[in-house]
Image (tube, helix red, strand yellow):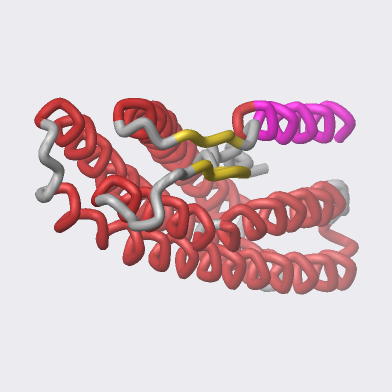
Amino acid sequence: MPFKKASILLLLGLLTIISACSSESTEEQIHGHLEEAVAQEKGFEEQQSNITELERQEQDLYSQIIELGTDEMEKIKELSQKATEVVTEREEALKAEKDSINSAKEEFQKTEYLISDIEDEQLKETAENMYSTMMDRFTAYEKLYQVYATAIQQEKDLYGMLQDEGTEQEELTNHINTINESYEQVLNANESFNESTASYNNLKKEFYSQAEIEVEYEDAESKNEDQNQEEQDQSESE
């Protein structure tokens, strides 16, 4: 069965903002755009859970298919059609996830002109590094999206092949190997995206600290660890 997509780190969000100023400084305006970008990625977070569940459903169907013999072609066709429908749902969820990321990117880019107005040179350097890292993160996501979308299409092709009685076993084997290779690329792209996310979160914290913007963070790391454990437990039970 093809590799599952690994968990993705999420942006750190804010629970509380403490500000004593009645008018917003440049740094506070930047803060506003950064946190709105986090809000725009809520859809991304929601789709991650949805995609994970759909992956589990598909894996269950695939496991049932490979247990069937060639004399059970009608059942293979039925299950393959169901799997195709699940993969299509996952494709739609992936597109919704990308829309969320694109909205976050559009909001985040509004900080660029504000960063150039920062007077403190050290703070400005941190902000520039933060901006550059986040843009690298968006680039990493685009790569992740492309390779994952390719893998999804290959899976749809696989289930089409399984419904065709004329498909040879060698052809199926070669196609499954191609899918597995694609998921290796997904895992690598996902790792790069997670690294960029972690780097950005650290720089964002540093920026807020230097700008003396007091915030309380959601425990995003623990949340991600819980998600990793949940997926590991699920994998072990299958």
Considering only vertical position in the picture, is 223 above or below 158? above
Residue toward you, 80 or 167: 80
Residue 34 position in % (x across, y down): 39, 51
Residue toward you, 163 or 147: 147
Q: Hey, which quadrant is residue 198 in on the image?
A: top left
Task: Give the left or right position of residue 129, taking residue 140 as reference.
Answer: left
Considering only vertical position in the picture, is 182 above or below 234? below
Range drawn in magenta: 222-238
Residue toward you, 92 or 96: 96
Q: Determine the residue positioned at 70% across, 50% down.
A: 52
Q: Determine the residue positioned at 15% across, 58% down.
A: 113
Q: Determine the residue positioned at 43% across, 57% down.
A: 37
Magenta stretch prevailing secondary structure: helix
Residue 212 position in % (x across, y down): 37, 31
Residue 209 position in % (x across, y down): 37, 27
In the image, is residue 224 part of the stretch drawn in magenta?
Answer: yes
Considering only vertical position in the picture, is 2 above or below 108? above
Q: Determine the residue positioned at 17% across, 39% down.
A: 128
Task: Give the left or right position of residue 233, taking residue 152 as reference.
Answer: right
Q: Quadrant of the N terminus?
A: top right
Q: Is residue 46 visible?
A: yes
Q: Is residue 180 visible?
A: no
Task: Give the left or right position of residue 98, taking residue 138 as reference.
Answer: right
In the image, is residue 127 part of the stretch drawn in magenta?
Answer: no
Q: Quadrant of the C terminus?
A: top right
Task: Give the left or right position of residue 44, taking residue 188 as reference.
Answer: right
